[in-house]
Amino acid sequence: ETGVTQSPTHLIKTRGQQVTLRCSSQSGHNTVSWYQQALGQGPQFIFQYYREEENGRGNFPPRFSGLQFPNYSSELNVNALELDDSALYLCASSLFSAPGAGELFFGEGSRLTVL
Amino acid sequence: AQSVTQLDSQVPVFEEAPVELRCNYSSSVSVYLFWYVQYPNQGLQLLLKYLSGSTLVESINGFEAEFNKSQTSFHLRKPSVHISDTAEYFCAVTRVYNQGGKLIFGQGTELSVKP
């Protein structure tokens, strides 16, 4: 069974640039969620994708966008990067219909630094 | 809306001592509750969860948590900790019937086990 994998693991961007982060979900999972974890904070929900559509969004501006592909992998795109976007970005996969639906399987994250 | 408060940001403890990590939540609807653990430079792993039934839930590595609806708490306990338990612990909540991965996390508690 393949777990959740994310790429890249680390990256550095400058303010105003754009970034794309990638995630492969765990085998058999059909839902992908993205979280932002700032240093010393708990993860914050960005959005979730199911059946290739956004299915729930947290309090993040439209410059945070995403995609889900037919194989359930996903991308997180962030435009016009700001210094406060520096964080660990976590991808999590799950089964949409699972009881509780909150048993998320997390990747190790992509650490973004914005200079 | 739901919210989670972890009452201690850091908990230092000696090996083989008992520990309690406190978590309180706020919600106007019924919720599911979770504890996740994050080891250094890794993603989050589910430690245990409360969905329904017995209010005392246990993990395979000796942790337990008790759902207390009247006090809106879900404290995590272990009678005897090991060095390997050193990690960040996150309490999380999602509303019942929530389809998908929107979890609300607390700020985290850093458990540091000293020899």
Image (cartoon, grey):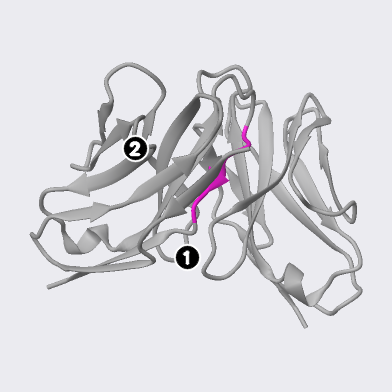
Please state the horizontal and vertical placement of residue A27, each as a whole percent of the image: 58, 29
Please state the horizontal and vertical placement of residue A68, each as a whole percent of the image: 80, 36
- Which residue is found at the position 51% from the left and 18% from the top? A99
* Image quadrant in which the N terminus of chain B is located: top right
Q: Nearer the viewer, residue B77 or A93?
A: B77
- CA distance for labels 2 and 1: 34 Å
Among the 4 quarters of the image, the one containing residue A54 = top right
Residues rendered magenta in the picture: B101-106
- The answer to whether residue A3 is visible is no
Magenta stretch: residue B48 in it?
A: no
- The answer to whether residue A48 is visible is yes
Asked if marks 2 and 1 fall on the same chain, the answer is: yes
- Which residue is found at the position 23% from the left and 36% from the top? B60
Q: Are marks 2 and 1 in contact (CB under 8 Å)?
A: no
Among the 4 quarters of the image, the one containing residue A38 = bottom right
Which chain is disc 2 placed on? B
Q: Is residue B49 above or below residue B13?
A: above
Q: Nearer the viewer, residue A45 or A103?
A: A45
| Circle number at residue B41 | 1
Around disc 1, counting alpha carbons within 10 Å, would you say few (fewer than 14), some (14 to 19), or many (20 or more)?
Answer: few
Q: Amino acid at mark 2?
A: Gln
Q: Residue furthest left?
A: B16
Element at label 1: loop
Report the mark closest to the observer, 2 or 1.
2
Residue indicated by mark 2: B71
Is residue A49 rendered to the left or right of residue B45? Answer: right
Q: Is residue B47 above or below residue B14?
A: above
Q: Amino acid at mark 1?
A: Asn
* Image quadrant in which the C terminus of chain B is located: bottom left
Please state the horizontal and vertical placement of residue B71, each as a whole percent of the image: 34, 37
- Which residue is found at the position 61% from the left and 27% from the top? A29
Element at label 2: loop
